[in-house]
Amino acid sequence: MNVGVVGASGYSGELLVKLLLGHPRVKLTTVTSRSQVGKALAQVIPSLRGLDRGLTFTDSDPAAIAGRELDVVFLALPHGAAADFAKVLVPAGKRVIDLSADFRIADLATYERYYGKHHAPELLSQARFVLPEITPPAWKNEVKLVAAPGCYPTSVLVPLVPLLKAGVVSREHIVVNSLSGVSGAGRKVDEMYLYVERAESAKAYGLVKHRHLAEIEEQLALHTGGSAVIQFNPHLAPMRRGIATTITVPAATGATLDGVYAAWREAYGASSFVQILPTGETPDTAYVVGTNRVDMSAVYDPRTRNFVITSAEDNLFKGASGQAVQIMNLWLGFPETTGLV
Amino acid sequence: MNVGVVGASGYSGELLVKLLLGHPRVKLTTVTSRSQVGKALAQVIPSLRGLDRGLTFTDSDPAAIAGRELDVVFLALPHGAAADFAKVLVPAGKRVIDLSADFRIADLATYERYYGKHHAPELLSQARFVLPEITPPAWKNEVKLVAAPGCYPTSVLVPLVPLLKAGVVSREHIVVNSLSGVSGAGRKVDEMYLYVERAESAKAYGLVKHRHLAEIEEQLALHTGGSAVIQFNPHLAPMRRGIATTITVPAATGATLDGVYAAWREAYGASSFVQILPTGETPDTAYVVGTNRVDMSAVYDPRTRNFVITSAEDNLFKGASGQAVQIMNLWLGFPETTGLV
Amino acid sequence: MNVGVVGASGYSGELLVKLLLGHPRVKLTTVTSRSQVGKALAQVIPSLRGLDRGLTFTDSDPAAIAGRELDVVFLALPHGAAADFAKVLVPAGKRVIDLSADFRIADLATYERYYGKHHAPELLSQARFVLPEITPPAWKNEVKLVAAPGCYPTSVLVPLVPLLKAGVVSREHIVVNSLSGVSGAGRKVDEMYLYVERAESAKAYGLVKHRHLAEIEEQLALHTGGSAVIQFNPHLAPMRRGIATTITVPAATGATLDGVYAAWREAYGASSFVQILPTGETPDTAYVVGTNRVDMSAVYDPRTRNFVITSAEDNLFKGASGQAVQIMNLWLGFPETTGLV
Amino acid sequence: MNVGVVGASGYSGELLVKLLLGHPRVKLTTVTSRSQVGKALAQVIPSLRGLDRGLTFTDSDPAAIAGRELDVVFLALPHGAAADFAKVLVPAGKRVIDLSADFRIADLATYERYYGKHHAPELLSQARFVLPEITPPAWKNEVKLVAAPGCYPTSVLVPLVPLLKAGVVSREHIVVNSLSGVSGAGRKVDEMYLYVERAESAKAYGLVKHRHLAEIEEQLALHTGGSAVIQFNPHLAPMRRGIATTITVPAATGATLDGVYAAWREAYGASSFVQILPTGETPDTAYVVGTNRVDMSAVYDPRTRNFVITSAEDNLFKGASGQAVQIMNLWLGFPETTGLV
């Protein structure tokens, strides 16, 4: 199986290339970047020195990519640009896994409210948001285009979906606070992301209007039998990678902490990538960075009658590129963990 | 005026010593530490090289300290130990400013539920929790012993008290998430606080049962005309100093963002140490570290009908030693900002 | 006395503004920046919220600045641009303290080899490189324009000059390795200085051709009675501020470690800003950041017959803005430490 | 092939366990730690959650380990303790790879000068310091006990040995400055290694007497046909992992930069783990952390006639555990890179 990565010079593109180079069942044959054409992979991604098998960056041209023998094409592009490629590659018969937001939201109006005009709305019906732990497995045979989930949504949906489904938590007054490492902003050359500005600095940002809300709430509605409105408060913390998410949610009447853990065990008992920690032990981003895991735990507060649920993941791995490879594994019929542990 | 610091080898003791050495109206004459007796200040606090005026650490002996000519004594000790000193120093006529939790909580039963047996309950009636921006100024003539507020409570109470008082926010479903730099744990030599463990790591801790809850809720009840139960979720972030607090609270019926800002301006319009940022601009710990400020702002989310309120402070400065000096300034009748800007 | 800062939006300009706002003997009346005209100081430098006395940025226009009542003008500009201002301000009678490299090098040919065409060579004869601990004090009455030293040169010259002068070290095989915090690069918005690139990363850079060599070697020749050729190896380390310098130099025949310390004590025994640490104790950048100090110590290695000399300073403080204020203090006849401790 | 790790709770033990769990040709069956007996691997090393194959820590008992079916035993213990295990395991016929200093130094007197009494001097004749890129390959059949090199020595010897051998550099006035991440100190619970103490801090330490000098100089003498005395200046930098080493060495008469690169290409042209960067490009620790590589480059300074040579490695990987696995691969006849890329 041959695979390609379009737009491989960002942080998630870089990790994707590393994972695919080390994957035992696929061969990375195409890596594109408009800004790096002609350069050896290791010249742009120096951690790959000696490991890049002589690959060089080619131009990011949709038609040229469509003409190559590729079983799967990953799009690691900004939203908008991703749709521009998808509308050439999907009709050409390629399986496309898109890491942008372009196909994460099924509802066109919602998409356009958050992201502006959609470049390929005609593909929405053939696309699917796939969070493997949550999306029913039939997607493998139904779609031509998969949207890999956003980093924050993964850290929220994995713990929350089974609880709403099981009815053990309220659908109101859900408050999500997340801390992200700086790579969450991508390789954006902006004063705000300079070392001196971000080291020793913590702050909230994107309050009220963060784009990831759209996919979080759509997925909750889709998979839990009802809607839920989320207060989502993202923060930047001075670290390179990792997301720590803390969800405060009122317990449903009569619900217990045992009920929370039972719902989780039912949903994820057989999962390779979800680790359920005992109550009282909180996940630490340091333990999941470099893995495709979500670690999570819950605690009950009798004073407030809330559950406080905490999760941690690597924003670039389970929150982006690792999850994209997991999706590919499932789509191509490989064991889910191939190339990921 | 002569002042002394008892227990000056921790992080807040260290900052207190620096602030008092640079203070134009008082003279630091006594610095004690059981573990550093006989050493020069600058030997233990190397950033003071050349500035320690020949001061050396003396032993932390209550009777000896009581016998010295000191107008104010600061206690930078663990809880329990602080009360042991206070019960000698207060009867000896010293003004005592305690940075521990021992006298922050007026209700003995509450104190003992969180901290265990109180070592000097007989002093509680002469003591007062003083957060200068909140506590009515009459305390200056009423007390012999002041409890300086905890770091987290300062970051919560300053923004929240005026809003509850003005009735613009709900008293229910208040969710507080805070991120603290690692110095919040003090100079505790424990594997958890090693550089390698904490760098590039974020995690929640102390969920449900954090001790600072006791003083937060008692103060809210005391100053806002009613009780409020808080979900308080503290986190460690990989930085040395700073607390970023994010409070999600439902808007009271009919309340507007203008109402929030009006309540703040009324409370803090003349304040030297509270900065009210416009909505949409969030406080950053990097801008308050090294200052005695609390920066804060608010945003309204029409989808959830919540206000999201963010604040930032330096946990060691406004959250501990700077605030203690501010208290001293007010107590001794100096301008509030003396030695603090 | 009124003072002004030209180009106040970089890191050293920012610190300069803070120091001058807090200085008890001068009044900061003019702050300029081409990119920030009309904005309040605290809008651009948020750590100054509440402290900026209503000052706003004006345009960086040489003639307009020359027309204002200013006793001292600080230039915190790139080289080249600084000379463009100096050639208007000096003839207009202003005392100018330049933080750029434009007037650090007396020899025009050397300057132009490292920096390209000089914009105001006619001013070189009225200018002086002033490192207060090293430059003989007569400069105060002789010059109209002072070049404040570079950050690396300060960390090298302070320990090395007295040793070469006293003849206790060799003039050959001197190897200087320095580690700098990332602010040494200024507020340069470049991918290399992004948080994600620099955190957890150390590397040498600028080997062989670093510009600071020119002023280091010229000053050594000027003040030590002979020339010395230096191997200067700068490195970036993942921290915001601070320079740690390690100098390996062969002992002169018969020289002892006592001789090293004797030379230092003679040179700096009365100095406010040099701390001589005992052998075996090495300076730590953490203890000097936020101070105007150079801490230093030496050790003798009997196996190699080298002295290994280590120094530490804050690159923005003693290495730039603090030192510039120290120069102003001396020039205007204030006590050297005014506004600096 | 079954393998075991003795003392697996330190940082290098932890990485060793991870590498061996993922190694396709060996089975990790024994993991010991005196302090963690009975605990699951993932309980002590949480990044292994879901990956520890049910392994638990057993006690670190030499006789019990000798009695198990183990083809290779890794010792990740302090010096002294390692020899205590080796003297039981080697006679029992186990291949032992020791990550401590106990068998790195062939000369007993040198060992005892740096480390004190040797616990198993009788084994020295059966042991060998093996740095695979440098040690002639015959060791595989000659020894029963391999000493894996120290972290600093690897970063010095790999670049320096071929140059001394080729005679392109001087044997005098060699100055080595290294910056290490904090994990170099191991998981040592000491105030000096607390997050707050080390973040934003750089300093030299261990000048003159660092223990790694002994193995550096012994290996240089052994492999380059003559002795060389090194000035070795180690530094701590605020990062978790990585060593950046800068070697200043006079060029031999007539030697050129081409000669340096030719010597390197001859030595390492076929090497999997040495990357030779072009002059002017300096290695960055960030690009080697997580790899078994040494990246290196050189530059010639015509002013000083020195070569400045820079190298970078991951102190825990190529500097410890990765190299130990590389040694195992060679010893057992596997391809050198098995389980390491």
Image (tube, coloured by chain):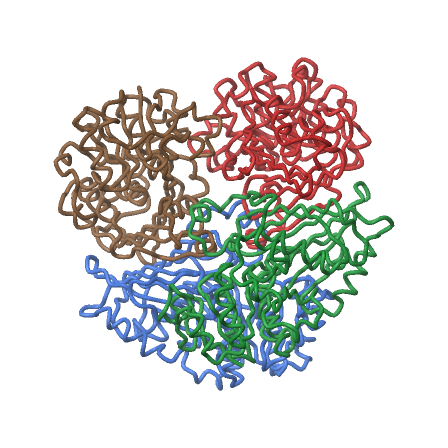
Chain colours: A green, B red, C brown, D blue
> Would you say residue D341 is visible in this rendering?
no
From the top left corner, tell me how far across and down residue D291 is, in percent: 48, 69
Residue that lies at the very extreme toward the front in this rendered image: A122
Quadrant placement of the C terminus of chain C: top left
Side of C195 where C334 appears, left or right: left
Residue pictured at 26% horizontal, 27% vertical: C65
Q: Is residue A53 above or below residue A299?
A: below
Q: Is residue C99 above or below residue D23?
A: above
From the top left corner, tell me how far across and down residue C102 is, in percent: 21, 40
Figure quadrant of residue D36: bottom right
Q: Nearer the viewer, residue D296 or B237?
A: B237
Q: Is residue B178 above or below residue D13?
A: above
Q: Nearer the viewer, residue D325 or A307?
A: A307
The image shows a total of numbered marks equal to 0
Residue pictured at 25% horizontal, 66% vertical: D170
From the top left corner, tell me how far across and down residue D224 is, in percent: 32, 74
Side of B274 where B140 appears, left or right: right
Side of B324 where D170 appears, left or right: left
Q: Nearer the viewer, residue D14 or A104?
A: A104
Quadrant placement of the N terminus of chain C: top left
Side of C308 where B290 appears, left or right: right
Q: Nearer the viewer, residue B289 or C312?
A: B289
From the top left corner, tell me how far across and down residue B128 is, in percent: 70, 22
> Would you say residue D216 is visible in this rendering?
yes
